[in-house]
Each structure stands twice: as structure tokens, then as C-alpha cells.
Image (cartoon, rainbow, N blue to C red):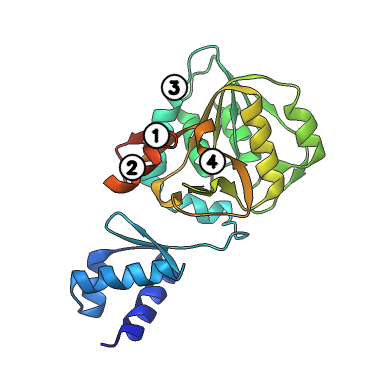
Amino acid sequence: MLTPERHQMIIHLLKTKDVVRLQELVDLTGASESTIRRDLSELEEKKILKRVHGGASILHRKLEEPSIQEKVIRHEQEKVAIARFAAGLVQEGDTIYLDAGTTTYQMVPYLHESIAVVTNSIQIGVELLKRNIRTFLLGGELKPGTLALVGPEAIRGIGQYRFDKCFLGMNSVHDKYGLTTPDPDEAYIKQLALHYSDEKFVVCDSNKFSQVSFAKVADLDQVTIITNDGLDEDERTKYGKLTQLQVVKS
């Protein structure tokens, strides 16, 4: 099989699965592992995909933002492990901010009832109430894709609070470009949450690393990042020098 043919097969599979393992590509193409690794390196250089531990993931456009329905089904096991660990950092009596996101949403079942939570997520707000957790919902424009509240009212609202801890979801984590997300409005709410919080956490699975979205949120050294164990040793070492990195087994 010619190299361009293999590349097209790899790209097609990534578009249907989002993440593929090395062995899947070997089985699909009949090529050796070393050949597939070389193909992945070439496609990564062309910024078509991102190599991850044991395979590759598709690179998303900087303005592209998956809907909440799409996010829920991606890497669910990893998100639950991250969320459980993050919720364990919350102490009784804490006031916290929970960002709109699927990993932050997964934190809710593991939270103490004695805390107070501010959120810009309609979905998270409803789940918090079901658990009898004191809940404060920001106002503003409701985004249809992510069900996040943004805009001037949300900005004014979050300014009324101060937090012991904040937990933010993030679309992209990059060693050079920092923490980024597709929507500038959501990026600004995240920036304010960081500003008003004593302790600052980002919760995201390892597939978000070495990717870049449109709007800058913060530099890596401003936060502690809680992620799963999908980073390879080189990535873990690289990011561990740039941020407080907490790796959770998934």
C-alpha cells in the first residue's frame, strides 16, 4: 500500500472515531508498527492529527466546539476518574466555582452537601439542587451547544463572589500557548473565576493536551491540572515542568 493511501485511511478512521489506537491502524493497513508510527509523525507535522499514548487523535479547528452531547460520550471513564479525584479536594464548608463542562458535571455526585457552589451551567445547577447543595447560578446568555451562561450579566454576577476553589473544564492545553477554549465569552468567565479563587484547578482528559483553541484563558503555571494517565512519559515530564500536574489512574 502506498503512503498516501495509508494516510487517507488513517484520516478517515480518525474522523469516524476521534481517537484510534496504533494496533487498530496496523490491523487496518497491514503495515508494521514502525511504518504506522512514521505515518503518524508525518501527519502530526502537517497538523492533521495529534499523537497520543498508544495511538493518535484528530486535531479540532480552533473555533470548533463540540456540543455537550458529543462531549458526554467522549472518554467518559477518564472523566469520571478525574472528577472523583477533583471532588475529593473539596472540603466541607467550601465555596467553589464549577465551570460548565462534562468533567465538572461528573464531579457533582461526589461533592459534600455542606458546600456552596456557583456555576454558569444550567445542567450542573439542576444536578446540584437534586443533591441538596446550595447553588448560585450566574445570569446571562445561554449558549445552545454547551448550556453555558455567558455575556455581561454573567460577568457582573461572578464578580459578586469569592471562591475557596474553582474547577474549570478546558478544550485545549498546550506547552507554548497555555489554556485555550473556542469561545472568547466563555474564556473571559473562566479568567474571572481564576481571579476570584484561592485555589485554581483545571480538569481535563489527556486528549486535550498539545492542542490549541481560539481564545486564551491562562498560562499553565496559574493552575493545577488534573488529568488521567493517558500522557506518555515525555509529555508528562514536559508539562510537569510547566504546571502542577496531578495524574489520576483511569
Query: Considering only order in the chain, which callout, 1 or 3, is on the residue closer to the N terminus?
Result: 3
Position in image of residue 178 (x %, y %):
53, 44
Q: Which mark is residue 169?
A: 4
Q: In percent of the image, x 41 and y 52: which residue is there?
A: 207
Q: Quadrant of the C terminus?
A: top left
For discs 3 and 2, the disc positioned in front in the rendered view: 2
**How far from the left and from the top, in percent, is residue 134?**
62, 20
- Whichever of labels 3 and 2 marks the residue nearer the N terminus, that label is 3
Reading the image, the residue beneath label 3 is 89
Tags 3 and 1 in contact by the CB under 8 Å rule? no
Q: Residue at horizontal 41%, vertical 76%?
A: 12
Residue 142 located left or right of residue 39: right
Q: Indicate whether 169 appears above or below 183.
A: above
**CA separation, marks 2 and 1?**
8 Å
Residue linked to disc 2: 236
**Picture disc at residue 245:** 1
Q: Amino acid at mark 4?
A: Gly
Callout 4 environment at 10 Å: few (<14), some (14 to 19), or many (20+)?
many
